[in-house]
Image: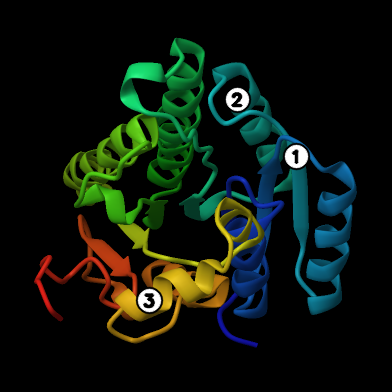
Amino acid sequence: MEGSSKTAVVTGGNDGLGREMVLSLARRGWDVAFNYLTGADRAKTLVEEVEAIGRRVLAHKSDVGIKTDVDAFYAALDKWGGTPDVLVNNAGVQTWSPLLDLAEEDWDRVIRTNLKGCFLHTQAAARRMAAAGTGGAIVNLGSGCNLLAFPRLVDYTASKGGVEQLTKVAALELGPHGIRVNCVAPGAIETDRTRAEVDDYAGRWSPITPLRRVGTVADVAAAVAWLAGPESAFVSGQTLLVDGGVFSQAVWPDY
């Protein structure tokens, strides 16, 4: 089994990308603490899967965008005995709406979860990493809309653009503590959520992706694990696109 007994925190670890990240890190030798907001049964199942791998695991119900919930999560983590060596800010929500129709409460919910949640967890985890004096790594989940404007994703695009800039300023300020901060920006990744967005999700996105396929949750989890591990020890303040090249290409007629 890779690695030593270190602790990784994954927000929104219950489903989709988060669940695969929890399992991926556990397989690589990490003890894992994750939070979830809904789906207690799925959280219980995930705990059992991690324990079957042979790692310690803590599941905690909390909202990443509410400071009292975040404080309670880290109080439970402290009691559990797991000073975070890695934080993965994965929790996120999405609203599909044109700008002119977007409800204020949806804007607030998305910004609070995706951006404020990233800030609150970064602050809480980094304080503990700095106090421990052993450094650490923070990996934030961005999106292809870090680079490009996505229609009908106004609040989500704004939040993910903010996450990329938060990544950079956090890398600047936390670097002297030996804490690296990076961002993983997925492209077209097939999950239960994306499959529900449109018919034939893979069929729509594969032809316009240079690698001619959509991504998997394992593709993203592997990138996160690399940024969390020692192989990326001199990488900080960067955004890694995991998109099969789809957002690297210009709009070009007849191609």
Looking at the image, residue 191 lies above or below residue 99: below
| Residue 134 visible somewhere in the drawing | no
Percent of width and height locating residue 10? 58, 52
Is 248 on the left-hand or right-hand side of 211? left
Which of the two discs, 2 and 3, labels the residue nearer the N terminus? 2
The residue positioned 77% from the left and 63% from the top of the image is 56
Looking at the rendered image, the disc whose residue lies closer to the viewer, 2 or 1, is: 1
Q: What residue would you read off at disc 3?
A: 230
Residue 60 is marked as: 1
Which of the two discs, 2 and 1, labels the residue nearer the N terminus? 1
Percent of width and height locating residue 155? 37, 29
Amino acid residing under circle 3: Pro
Q: Give the residue furthest to the front.
A: 254
Amino acid residing under circle 2: Asp
Indicate the secondary structure of the residue bearing disc 3.
Answer: helix
Looking at the image, residue 91 lies above or below residue 224: above
Viewer-side residue, 16 vs 199: 199
* Distance Cα–Cα, label 1 vs label 3: 27 Å
Q: Which image quadrant: the N terminus?
A: bottom right
Looking at the rendered image, the disc whose residue lies closer to the viewer, 1 or 3, is: 1
Crowd class of label 2 (few under 14; some 14 to 19; many from 20; radius 10 Å): some
Q: What residue would you read off at disc 2?
A: 71
Indicate the secondary structure of the residue bearing disc 1.
Answer: strand
Crowd class of label 3 (few under 14; some 14 to 19; many from 20; radius 10 Å): few
Indicate the secondary structure of the residue bearing disc 2.
Answer: helix
Is 240 on the left-hand or right-hand side of 195? left
